[in-house]
Amino acid sequence: MLIVIPCRNEAGNLPAVVAELRAARPDDDVVVVDDASRDATAAVARGLGCEVLRLPVHLGYGGAVQAGIKLGLRRGYDVVVTFDGDGQHDPADVEALAGAVAGGADLALGSRFQAPGAYRGGLVRIAGRRLFAGLCRALTGVALDDPTSGLKALGPRAQALFATSRFPDRFPDADALVVAHRAGLVLTQRPARMRPSRNVHSMHDGLRPAAYAANMALSLLVAALGRATDLRE
Ligand SMILES: Nc1nc2c(ncn2[C@@H]2O[C@H](COP(=O)(O)OP(=O)(O)O)[C@@H](O)[C@H]2O)c(=O)[nH]1
Ligand SMILES: [Mg+2]
């Protein structure tokens, strides 16, 4: 299995995040996608023995995740897992996600709402997640209650979908799930014991949630109304 860690300035967190991951999952390969960080993320990741995919320009979260998944797809991994670099995800949750993919799902999403006591974030986040989970459900009929979760396990078909040019590569959240559903992929969810971030700042700070909501609404429309992706093409 390949674990993809998208990172922007995570040099301070990677040692603890990778140590915890390695302790729980010694046999998995780990690639850190360093998205033109301004700190020593790449050097720290290399020092920890991780493979590093260093992007020459800042692509943003979705583009970095997509790059890591393309690497996994090219190398033929049965499962690629996306895992945040800020300590929010618990490596113990990866097993159930991978198991869901081994059991026939194309994509398994880690959901904090399936894990009692998991960290939920502030009110804006909770409201946004509800809105987009509701829209996602209305558009797909599939109940996935944590569409913004960065913890996902992808089988080969989901990896192929995430690698296509039509994939919503800005924030692959509810929009990506709609695209995946319309491409005929089997989506499911498993518990994820999310924790508070080790960082003070997030990519969704300040006024960005407003821009995120507008972008996501538009991207959802495109995902729902555009041509469905045919993975056989
Ligand atoms: N590659 C890349 N990763 C990012 C970027 N912004 C955030 N990340 C990473 O994506 C993960 C989640 O980001 P975070 O800011 O914690 O988002 P939040 O958990 O939704 O608040 C972390 O591993 C970050 O390092 C970015 O611009 N590019
Ligand atoms: Mg975070």
Image (cartoon, rainbow, N blue to C red):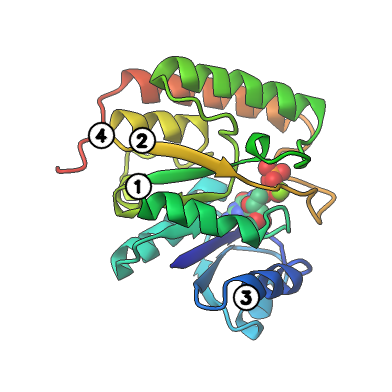
Foreground mark, 2 or 4, reads 2
Q: In the rendered image, which residue does mark 2 sit on?
A: 180
| Amino acid carrying mark 3 in the image | Arg
Q: Is residue 29 above or below residue 213?
A: below
**Mark 3 vs mark 4, CA separation in Å:** 36 Å
**Would residue 26 be found to the left or right of residue 118 on screen?**
left
Mark sitting earlier along the chain (3/4): 3
Q: Give yes or no for contact between labels 2 and 3 (Cβ–Cβ under 8 Å).
A: no
Q: Which mark is residue 22?
A: 3
CA distance separating discs 2 and 1: 7 Å
Task: Name the residue: 71% across, 64% down.
Answer: 10
Q: Residue at x 29, y 49 (%)?
A: 157
> Residue 196: x and y, percent?
80, 48
Q: Is residue 64 visible?
A: no
Label 2 environment density (alpha carbons within 10 Å; few <14, some 14–19, many ≥20): many
Between 170 and 28, the residue placed more toward the observer is 28
Counting residues from the start of the chain, the first of labels 3 and 1 encountered is: 3
In the structure shown, which secondary structural element does the residue marked by tag 3 occupy? helix
**Could you say whether the residue bearing mark 4 is in a helix, strand or loop?**
loop
**Among numbered discs 2 and 4, the one appearing first in the sequence:** 2
Identify the mark nearer the N-term, 4 or 1: 1
Vertical relation: 104 (above or below) 10: above
Residue 183 vs 90, above or below: the answer is above
Instruction: Residue at 63%, 37% (x, y): give it.
Output: 114
Residue 217 location (% of width, % of height): 53, 20
Q: Are marks 2 and 4 in contact (CB under 8 Å)?
A: no
Q: Tell me the residue at 25%/25% (across/down).
A: 227
